[in-house]
Structure formats: structure tokens, C-alpha cells
Image (cartoon, helix red, strand yellow):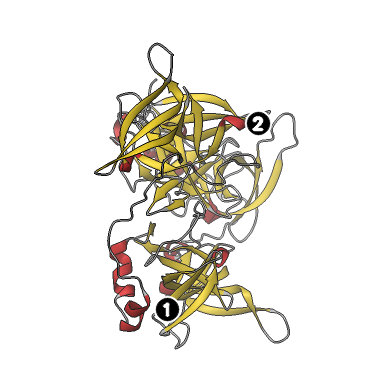
Amino acid sequence: MKIRRQSQGPLSKGDQIEVKRPNGAYYAATVLRPPSAMQINMVFVEYHAEDGSKCVRGYVDLTHVRPSPPLELNRCFKIGDAVDAYWENGWHQGVVRDLLKDSKYVVGFHGNEGKVEEKSEIHQCNLRLHREWDDGSWVPSMAELANSSNENDDKPRNVKLKIVFRKKQADAEFRKGDEVEITSDEEGFRGSWYNAVIVEYRGNDKYLVEYSTSRKEDGVPLRAEAKAQHIRPCPPELSPVASFCLREVVDARYNDGWWIGVISRVLDGSKYAVYFSLPDEELEFDHLKLRIHQDWKNGKWIIASEENSRPLVMNSNRLLHKMDVNEKRFRVKFPKGTRVEVKSDEPGYEGSWYSAIIVDSLGNDKYLVEYLTLKTEDLGAFLREEAYASYIRPRPQHARCTRRYKLFENVDAWYNDGWWIGQVIKVLTTWKYAVYFQTTNEVMEFKHNDLRLHQEWINGKWIIPSKDTI
């Protein structure tokens, strides 16, 4: 396969690129994981969904990836120009059909399957000349575009265009209609984030925002001016976790906002005690009122780590008295007859899990197990062998999924008498899926009933990992 990126060099984590979606439009994306020896033709990226509602993470074929085109400020367009228009959160190919006042254009978008061409008014700052990325270079080139622009400048025009220099737009990090979260320096609100929508950019790093949950006394949504430093995009939606752990940093839904806290106690009934350093108090929350905490740093979302959480945890002596200080490694003892799963580390089988029964405890964290699906070479009996406790886990709970699996969702696939960790890369018809296996760099099709939700057994609890951790 010919990968057309020769002049750009290898992709690196953090590179800003554009990804082509099935609708033919290109969407801005960030490289999270560059191609590797196991995935030479795939890159793991993050981009906004087509409806702009959330960030999506997943693998994309390199043939659908290109660098972001160079900026062309203050370019004017004429009727018939092939352009890319920033419309519905992506760059769509179209043609200029008419010139309007106030630096606006009527752009026609190509219809599919005989559909009538759709037209829309697009501002000059949301247009660029259409170009193709071919064999490591842009066609037409920047030099060709410059010559074309000079020729056009020599021709008289019957329409007077208002040129927008876009300083205001260039300075703006967010666009009108962007869904964001707002924080405040006001006493009593520090450490909390509230959902809002960008109404307009007012210059000097200030925006007019409309809060999604806060309203005036007359019921009208509250609008206020906010500094850019107090605004961030909405965090990407992560796969849900089966449970939260002690000392884990979370966001808690409280008083119509998200407040940063730390799990101080794990309670019964899927409830948790959460400690907040600002103010210094502890409250109880249901599992559904919590989410994994993420930090917005240098234009990227980062899942909070233990290092990030330490300042919050150590902020108050009161919290330390409430938390379990037992730091011993969590260990599970498996009684005889317990049904478990045992992991293989044999070449070609790494990461696969096989159903078994505990036959006996051998001491020193070792057990004798009997497999339920694997037999001896003469097929006369089920295979027995010794296994370390670190290779044994209970059977996953609530693993069967009654809904359809989603694109890029992590799953376990039943194959060769065991469960193999994979990722859904295509949703097929009749409840079938194409699943990619990183350990073997293979893609195979599976029926719905041959899959289950992927979960990790960590510190004695089942955790549903995020989509990019396989």
C-alpha cells in the first residue's frame, strides 16, 4: 500500500492532522498514538464527532489522513471557485455560487446519489480553496495559488467585497456555538465547572457565554462574560467504569456543576464519599453522579494520574483520617472449586483468558487449575497445570451486552476456546462486528453472542477501561 505522506515524515504523538470521514468531509484531529510495527497502516487519533457533541477516539487508516493545509488569510473568492467550507464541524468540499455583502458567499455542496445540491451562506473566514494532498504535496501548490491570486487581482470586479482580516477570529480559541465548560475565581465556586455554549467572541480573550443549567429569575438562560483562561472544551466521553477506587480523583455532579474531588471512602450500594478541598468538606454521591477526572493541558485532555491527585489528597489532614491507610497489595484467595479465568503467556496466545476451576492451593501464590475448554494431547482429560495467582482472576460480572456494541469499543471475543481482547473497528449488519486484535495484528468477524464487554480485574474490582488503553 502506498502511503502518501513521504514529505511530511513520520507521524508523532500530538501532531495536528485532518481525518476523512465517510461523508467525504475532513475533520481536525490530534494524533494520540502514531503507527507502529504492529499497526503500520493505522494511526490512533482523537477528533470531534460529526455532530460536534463529543470527542471520538479510534484507529484511522493512513489513506484517510492528511496534514492540515497551510493557512491563507484574507483570500477572496470568485463564482465557480472550488472551496472547502467549514460547515457542520468539518471541512466540506463545495463550489462558490454567489457573492454576498459583509464578506459572505453562497456555497453549493455536492449532492449524493442524485440529490439536489445543498446551498448555504458561509463567511469568508470559514472558507479556503480546495486542494488535494497527493504524494506528499498539495495540489495546486502554494506558488500556483499565489499566481492565480495575482491574475485575479488584475481583473475588474463588479462586486465590492468587505475584506475581513480575521484578527479577531485568529485570536479566538472557540467558535460560536461551541459547547464548553466554565469555571470561576469567585469564592465558593473555585474548582467547579459549568456547561455553557459560546455566544460570541468579544476580543481581549473574552467571550459571551450562555449557561446550559443556570437561569435568571424569569427563566431565561443566564448569559455572562468569561475570560478565555476560565473556559475549556467539554471533556471527551470515556467508557464508564464499573467502580471507583479509594483516592481516585473524580468530578462530582453537584449544584448543576462538576466539582473536583477525591474518593475518600467506598460505601455500599454503589455509593462513595467524596472529599472536596474547596471547600473543606465531604459529601456522599451515587456512582452515576461521578465521572473520571480529566485535565485540559496544552490543548489536550489528560486523565488524572496518581501524581496529579497527590496535591488534592494531601491538602487536608482531615481527609487522611477518613481514608484507608492500608497500602498492602490487594490479593484474592481462591477456594477449591471456584470457577476462574487463567491468562496465557505462551507465544501467540499472550493476553488470552481461559475458563478453569481451582483444584487446589499450592502455596506461594500458586494454584493447581483444571481448564474447562482445554484438553490433554490425547484428548482423554481436561488439562491441568500450575498457575500463579497473578495469572488468575474471577469470572467477569455482567459481561454480556444486550445492546449493540459501538465503534471502537473494547471487547473480549470467544476464539480458539478462550477470550481474546480486541476492539470493534466496524459494525456490520445482522449483529455482526469486525474486531481488531493488537496482539496478532489481525481483523476477524464475530457474531454478537461471541463477544462480551471487556473488563479489567484491578485491586479486587472489575473496571471497564477507556477505549484507547488496549
Q: Categorize mark 1 by other alpha carbons within 10 Å: few (<14), some (14-19), many (20+).
A: many
In the rendered image of this protein, does residue 81 appear above or below residue 122?
above
Residue at point 38% right, 39% down?
142
Element type where label 2 sits in the image: loop
Viewer-closest of 158 and 104: 104
Residue 190, given in percent of the width and then of the height, sits at: 43, 81
Residue at point 56% right, 69% down?
195
Q: Name the residue tied to disc 1.
A: 276
Viewer-closest of 303 and 169: 303
Element type where label 1 sits in the image: strand
Question: Which part of the image, by quadrant, shows the C terminus?
Answer: top left
Res 61 visible: no
Residue 397, given in percent of the width and then of the height, sits at: 53, 46
> Is 192 positioned to the left or the right of 386 in the image?
right
In the rendered image of this protein, does residue 10 appear above or below residue 248?
above
Marks 2 and 1, how far apart at CA:
45 Å
Occupied quadrant, residue 280: bottom left
Question: Which part of the image, by quadrant, shows the N terminus?
Answer: top left
Q: Categorize mark 2 by other alpha carbons within 10 Å: few (<14), some (14-19), many (20+).
A: few
Occupied quadrant, residue 227: bottom left
Residue at point 33% right, 79% down?
321
In the rendered image of this protein, does residue 136 appear above or below residue 119?
above
Q: Name the residue tied to disc 2.
A: 431
* Type of the residue with mark 1: Phe
Viewer-closest of 405 and 199: 405
Residue at point 33% right, 73% down?
313
Residue 293, given in percent of the width and then of the height, sits at: 43, 64
Residue 131: numbered disc: none
Earlier in the chain: of badge 2 and badge 1, it is 1
* Type of the residue with mark 2: Trp
